[in-house]
Amino acid sequence: MPVELMESIGGANPTSSSADRLVAEEDAVLVAGAKTGDTRAFDLLVERHEGRIFSLAWRMTRNREDAEDVVQQSLQKAFLHLKKFEGESLFSTWLTRITRYLCCCARSADRVSFRSTIQSWVKKHYWRWRSLIHVRVPKITIHSESGSEFFPRP
C-alpha cells in the first residue's frame, strides 16, 4: 500500500471527528487506493466490512452456508465493479445494497428450487398418488340406541 494512504489512515485524529465519520473517510481513502489497483487496500475494506455483511446475509437467508456464499459473491461483485463506484454514498452503503440484492436473489432461487422439487415429485409419483386419492372407502353405518341410522346407506 502506498505510504501516503497508510499515513492518511493512521494520521487521522479521532478526537476531531466522530468515529463514523472517521471510518467513512478511511473507507474513501481505501476505495481510492483500490481503484488504482492496490489489492491491499481492497483487502482492508474486506476486513472492515466482512463481518457486518455476513451478519446481514445470515439474517436474510437464515442459513450459514447461503450467507457465506452471498458474502463471497458480494465482495466479488464489489471488486469487479469498484471502478463504477462514484462515492456519492458510503462504501458500506454500496456494499450493503449489493448484499441485500444478492440475498433476495438467493431466497428467490430457493423458492424456485423448492417449487421445482415439489413439481418433480408430483410428476414422478402422480399415478400412485392419484390411486390413493380415488380409493373407495367402505360406507359405515352407525346406529343409535333407538335403532335409527346416523349415516344412512346410499
Image: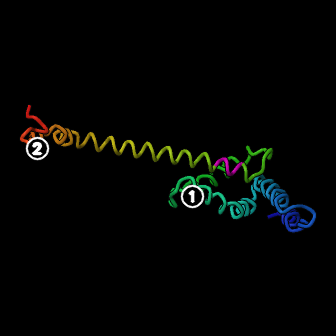
Furthest residue toward right = 16
Q: Position of residue 67 (x, y in %)?
A: 55, 57
The stretch drawn in magenta includes residue 25? no
Main SS class of the magenta portion in the image: helix
Residue 117: x and y, percent? 35, 45
Residue positioned 90% across, 61% down in the render: 17
Counting residues from the start of the chain, the first of labels 1 and 2 encountered is 1
Eyeballing the image, is 47 above or below 137? below
Residue that badge 1 annotates: 58
Q: Quadrant of residue 132?
A: top left
Crowding near pointer 2: few (<14 within 10 Å), some, many (20+)?
A: few
Q: Which residue is mark 2?
A: 144
Q: Which residues are magenta?
A: 94-98
The amino acid pointed to by label 2 is Ser
Where is residue 66 drawn, in percent x and y? Answer: 51, 56
Mark toward the viewer: 1 or 2: 2
Left or right of 106 in this view: 28: right
Q: Residues within 10 Å of mark 1 (few under 14, many from 20)?
A: some
Tell me the distance, in whole angstroms, between the alpha carbons under discs 1 and 2: 60 Å
Between residue 42 and residue 91, name the one nearer to us.
91
For mark 1, give the secondary structure: helix
131 to 42, vertically: above or below: above
